Image (spheres, rainbow, N blue to C red):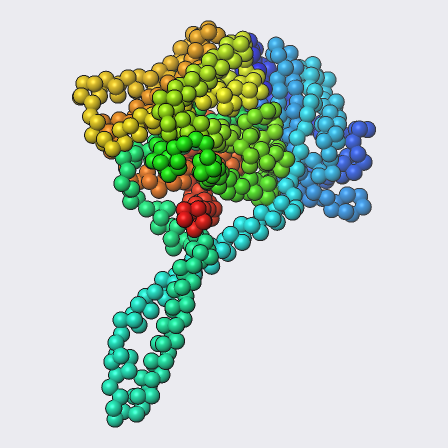
């Protein structure tokens, strides 16, 4: 938010004098660094200041320390208010105090506000400095304030410098959580290894016993008359083969047992080919795989923007955020990135569609008279299966976050520290994710891995869908009417909240333009936590997907419901028109043409159901043979293995983005080439990690659930 608050001044108020202020600022920072050698402060602990002064008295050591500090840089008018030094070099510095005890240094970020004589507003600067580890938060502020107090009077006339805040690198602890997580992952790895070996042994045993069983007596015993030695040899061979057959039979019986089936669920020999298989099932919704992959890739594209800039606190590690806003984000084509939030609605629509389309064929399994015990047991299992499907990968990611993730930043420095809050949140509020209620109540600062709000919305919709599905068993029209009413209620609620809270049109376009139109509400708690993640505002897309599922069920056995050519073309153009209007309809804002609050409320309320409606037509048209080349592309076999990874990609990709950004000692320079390089890197790394995570957790759990259901439930 510092960047956004600073934007108007930098672009419209500073003007030509701002260049002079930048030159003066360089003088001020040079004087600050010179003053650091003259520090005396009564507010610092004895150990902190004595260690710092002892190191500064050593010329070579002092040079190394100051060399690691951040320096004034170009690009202040582009938003470069983060002056990074070299954290890795700082962490390598060691010295001895007057008593001969060795102490280390660590970096920290200090927030300065500079009131420049040629600048109408204060300039916030985050400055990386290198101080002894013994200097705590208060010591850091006091010590740097002492440095500021030593500024030469001629420089002080150009600027007044105030130390506001400090962020210290706090390494992750190798505590019980770390060792527990490592132990769990190690045990899983061992189980996978043993299961794979057992699988290969069983396969070889089948081959061996099959070969023995095909041998007749002559092959085994042979013609032994008159050949005593050969007779003995053949008898031994027969005995060995007999023992092998008995052992093989025992192993074959074990391989058919329930315990073995559970154990082999972790076998790489079975899971890798299954995961990489491009064999399509005999279904007419093959286009779903392509939509899944393209949608999750769109989500990753949008999050590359969010997690490198907007959501990094206290300040984005970005060199040119203001230039990004003026040169890149202000171009109409960038709306395809900033409006990537509609990819989430694609998943809502897909979930609603698949829920209905896959559940309806199973409904005849239960009696039609309502209610009775059989019905309740069916619906309990209906919910439990969904829970089992979602939770293990979520537990895997949470365990990784609280156990391993927190120590991955050790040695990176203070730039990693803001992300440690996510670890703390997961340690405190992991249970919200496991109960799928992270989208309810006070969500500000009380969620573990905030992007998992989608799972809470989706699971709650899944549970509530039981009501229309029950109605569909007896009164199809009642189920459809109920979903229509729910969509209408969600749309009206979204409209009312957007209008009363003065929200901007959608999420990030509104954030971007609040510096130019301050009457748009940019409060994060109101926009994101109060509106964007709430299930009662987001049901529209899910409900439209459910209606598409009802319609697809009606034509389930008619895969050649062809539209006339002209009608088909018009419907496709209408669908594309809706999508284009939803994504690029806000282009006028980039030129200062802002919609009224009433128009904005209509857009926020209708855009997401409209997107889901256009996508639902794509699904239905492809199912009925009206998709043409689009259906051919979306049903491409290459999408099949990638589609199986989309859940893990969704869970893991923000961690990959954060690590790539925070682990760097340099700031990210926004331009098209760098953004594309980051995006491709994140995709490759995330899909690779998701592949192994699926083999470790997701695939085994699905197979174990099926084995348990086949043994205890289906009978």
Q: Between 42 and 592, which is closer to the camera in this rendering?
A: 592
Picture residue at 39% right of the left edge, 50% below the top: 271
Residue 366 shown left or right of residue 568 in the figure: right
Horizontal and vertical percent position of residue 689: 45, 43
Picture residue at 33% right of the left edge, 80% below the top: 238
Q: Between 306 and 277, which is closer to the camera in this rendering?
A: 277
Quadrant for the N terminus in the image = top right
Horizontal and vertical percent position of residue 10: 54, 14
Q: Between 354 and 607, which is closer to the camera in this rendering?
A: 354
In the displayed structure, 123 sits above or below 423; it is above
In which quarter of the view is residue 482 placed? top left
Horizontal and vertical percent position of residue 405: 57, 41
Picture residue at 62% right of the left edge, 45% below the top: 177
Instruction: Say how many tags the image has.
Output: 0
Horizontal and vertical percent position of residue 50: 78, 37
In the displayed structure, 527 sits above or below 290; it is above
Q: Determine if residue 584 is in view.
A: no
Q: Determine if residue 475 is in view.
A: yes
- Taking the view exactly as shown, the residue that stands out farthest to the left is 565
Residue 656 shown left or right of residue 630 in the figure: right
Picture residue at 35% right of the left edge, 50% below the top: 273
Q: Between 378 and 436, which is closer to the camera in this rendering?
A: 378
């Amino acid at each position: 938010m510092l960047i956004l608050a600073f934007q108007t001044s930098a672009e419209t108020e500073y003007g030509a004098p701002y260049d002079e202020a930048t030159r003066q600022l360089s003088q001020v920072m040079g004087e600050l660094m010179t003053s650091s050698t003259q520090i005396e402060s009564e507010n610092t602990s004895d150990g902190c200041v004595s260690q710092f002064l002892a190191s500064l008295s050593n010329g070579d050591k002092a040079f190394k320390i100051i060399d690691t500090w951040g320096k004034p840089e170009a690009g202040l008018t582009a938003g470069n208010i983060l002056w990074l030094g070299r954290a890795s070099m700082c962490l390598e510095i060691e010295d001895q105090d007057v008593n001969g005890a060795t102490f280390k240094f660590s970096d920290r970020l200090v927030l300065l506000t500079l009131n420049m004589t040629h600048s109408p507003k204060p300039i916030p600067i985050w400055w990386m400095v290198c101080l002894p580890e013994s200097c705590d938060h208060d010591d850091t502020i006091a010590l740097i304030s002492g440095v500021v107090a030593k500024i030469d009077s001629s420089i002080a006339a150009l600027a007044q410098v105030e130390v506001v805040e400090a962020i210290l690198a706090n390494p992750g602890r190798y505590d019980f959580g770390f060792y527990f997580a490592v132990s769990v992952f190690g045990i899983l790895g061992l189980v996978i290894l043993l299961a794979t070996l057992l699988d290969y042994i069983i396969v070889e045993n089948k081959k061996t016993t099959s070969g023995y069983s095909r041998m007749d007596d002559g092959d085994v015993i042979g013609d032994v008359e008159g050949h005593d030695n050969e007779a003995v040899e053949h008898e031994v061979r027969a005995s060995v083969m007999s023992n092998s057959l008995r052992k093989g039979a025992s192993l074959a019986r074990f391989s058919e047992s329930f315990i073995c089936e559970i154990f082999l669920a972790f076998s790489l020999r079975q899971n890798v080919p299954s995961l990489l298989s491009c064999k399509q099932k005999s279904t007419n919704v093959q286009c779903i795989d392509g939509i899944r992959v393209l949608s999750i890739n769109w989500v990753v594209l949008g999050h590359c923007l969010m997690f490198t800039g907007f959501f990094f606190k206290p300040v984005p590690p970005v060199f040119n955020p203001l230039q990004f806003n003026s040169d890149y984000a202000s171009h109409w084509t960038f709306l395809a990135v900033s409006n990537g939030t509609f990819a989430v609605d694609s998943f809502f629509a897909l979930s609603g569609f698949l829920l209905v389309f896959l559940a309806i064929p199973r409904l005849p399994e239960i009696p039609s008279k309502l209610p009775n015990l059989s019905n309740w047991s069916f619906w309990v299992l209906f919910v439990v299966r969904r829970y089992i499907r979602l939770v293990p990968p979520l537990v895997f990611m949470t365990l990784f976050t609280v156990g391993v993730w927190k120590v991955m930043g050790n040695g990176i420095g203070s730039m990693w520290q803001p992300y440690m809050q996510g670890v703390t949140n997961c340690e405190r509020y992991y249970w919200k994710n496991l109960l799928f209620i992270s989208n309810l109540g006070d969500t500000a600062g009380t969620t573990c891995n905030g992007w998992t709000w989608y799972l809470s919305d989706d699971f709650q919709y899944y549970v509530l869908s039981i009501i229309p599905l029950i109605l569909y068993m007896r009164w199809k029209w009642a189920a459809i009417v109920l979903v229509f009413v729910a969509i209408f209620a969600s749309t009206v609620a979204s409209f009312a909240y957007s209008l009363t809270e003065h929200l901007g049109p959608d999420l990030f376009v509104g954030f971007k333009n609040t510096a130019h139109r301050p009457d748009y509400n940019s409060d994060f708690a109101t926009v994101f936590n109060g509106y964007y993640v709430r299930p009662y505002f987001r049901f529209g897309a899910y409900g439209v997907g459910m209606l598409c599922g009802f319609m697809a069920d009606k034509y389930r056995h008619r895969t050649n419901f062809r539209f006339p050519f002209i009608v088909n073309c018009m419907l496709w153009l209408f669908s594309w028109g809706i999508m284009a209007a939803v994504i690029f309809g806000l282009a006028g804002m980039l030129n200062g043409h802002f919609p009224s609050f009433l128009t904005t409320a209509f857009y926020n309320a209708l855009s997401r159901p409209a997107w889901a409606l256009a996508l639902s037509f794509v699904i239905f048209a492809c199912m009925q043979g009206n998709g043409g080349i689009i259906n051919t592309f979306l049903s491409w076999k290459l999408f099949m293995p990638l589609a199986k990874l989309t859940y893990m990609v969704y869970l893991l990709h923000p961690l990959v983005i954060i690590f790539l950004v925070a682990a760097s000692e340099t700031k990210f320079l926004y331009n098209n080439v760098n953004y594309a390089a980051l995006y491709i890197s994140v995709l490759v790394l995330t899909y690779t990690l998701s592949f192994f995570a699926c083999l470790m957790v997701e695939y085994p759990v699905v197979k174990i659930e099926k084995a348990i259901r086949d043994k205890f439930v289906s009978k």
